Image (cartoon, grey):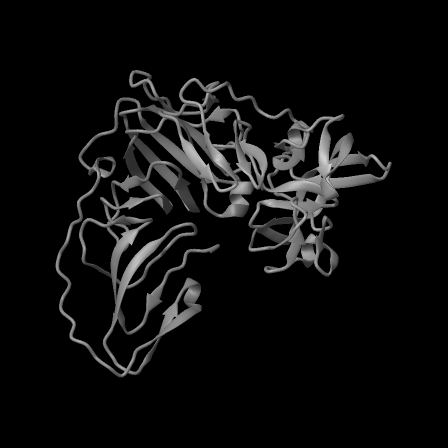
Amino acid sequence: MKETLALSINGCEMQLLSKDGIYIRDFPRQINSAPVVPGGRADIMVRCMNPSQSFTMSGWRGTTVGTIATSATTVQSAPLAAWTPPFPSYLSDLRNTPASNGCSCSTELDNDAVNGRSFQLNEILHSGYLGAVIERSVNADDHPYHQHVYPYQLIGGQSQYNRAGDWHDSILGSATVRHKADRFAGKIMIHCHRLEHEDEGMMAMEWIDPNPNAGCSCGFRPAPATVVTNSPITIPVATSAPVTTAPATAAPVTSAPSMAPTRRQRKWCFPQEAEVQTEKGHVTMDELSLGDKVLTGSGKFEPIYSFGHKNQDATGDYVRVSVKQSNKQRLELELSPQHMLLVNSSRFVPASMVTMGDNVTVADNGVGTVEHITMVERPGLYAPFTPSGTLLVNGVVVSAYVALQESETLVVGGWSTPLTL
């Protein structure tokens, strides 16, 4: 969903139940419209009183998004009773709880940037600490402000849909919000929930320090050198034994070396002229459709079940990797800097970290050697997904995913791949 949904159903009653997966506090709340932002969710109860009738569901700018058809049978309906659900401690009401000292900061989304800066891997925007009540004055204009890890509570707002006390993880426009960092320390991603704006750099990281005496700070500064987890995390994977990440003593995280300092690197996958092999032959990315079966790293054909990006009108910066096979034939692979390919038959590595002399896996489980690496600009942004998470692009085995950083490894489809927490 690229624009705000603005769902309405003429002739039917709409009662809001929850937003972004969290119940409201003042049910029942009747609404005339549900302005669900890109990336947002809403649970709504609908009651249509007239039998044997169709009701139009309208969305953005009055467009029809669906219809509701009632049956000829009527049922008794009673007024909805007032109800306030029990909330867990991390959703305690913060409307009358001031922000901790120094923990009230401003965040603005505009011009492909957050607070005037496009995303940088090794810096954080604001910081807090475990136990702090954190407040943000958000000015996002028409950009959906989305925050990972901790949902936030609206401190102001009195519309039908958005009221003080409601919890969100995505909002549109300007608002003052609060949350309490009560459990998880480390990096928290914030970004515009329009993917093309996020890809252009409208995202940033905040930091929650595990030390309750660390204090808060507002404004950009270098990111801490380590990733912190509060306890071991076990992730079961069907094709291997569970993988357990290290606790708080995790190794320092280093950023990928820049391939071209004068160019902005974009995590946009593959250009439109990149080729994959389908059951009917080789096709370029712009010829792919949902459901097409493509050759994957396992040597099997799998269906394309989704696209992360599918845009023929945009242009991206790509790493061009020249690979020489044992039979002297050369393969040319172009992919975004943070897109991953299988190196040394053991692990997926972002293209920006591949070096000349590395061995990469090619078709039929063969091996090729990287001989040359350059940056190029190409039309088209395509990111097809397969069930196994692998593809064979221009004859080279690649992952269907990107990575922000290297950290622990996770076995997927028989190969290990970086796991970003």
Q: Is residue 229 visible?
A: yes
Q: Is residue 81 above or below residue 252?
A: below
Identify the residue at image location x=65%, y=41%: 398
Q: Is residue 310 above or below residue 134?
A: below
Dividing the picture into quadrants, the one containing residue 136 is: top left
Q: Is residue 160 visible?
A: no
In percent of width and height, residue 207 lies at 40, 26
The one nearer the camera, 280 or 114, is: 280
Q: Is residue 150 above or below residue 210?
A: below
Q: Is residue 412 left or right of residue 51?
A: right
Dividing the picture into quadrants, the one containing residue 48 is: bottom left
The one nearer the camera, 385 or 5, is: 385
Q: Is residue 341 left or right of residue 323?
A: left
In percent of width and height, residue 171 lies at 36, 46
Number of numbered markers? 0
In percent of width and height, residue 257 lies at 64, 24
Identify the residue at image location x=87%, y=36%: 328
In percent of width and height, residue 266 lies at 61, 38
Q: Is residue 250 left or right of residue 298?
A: left
The one nearer the camera, 397 or 204, is: 397
Dividing the picture into quadrants, the one containing residue 389 is: top right
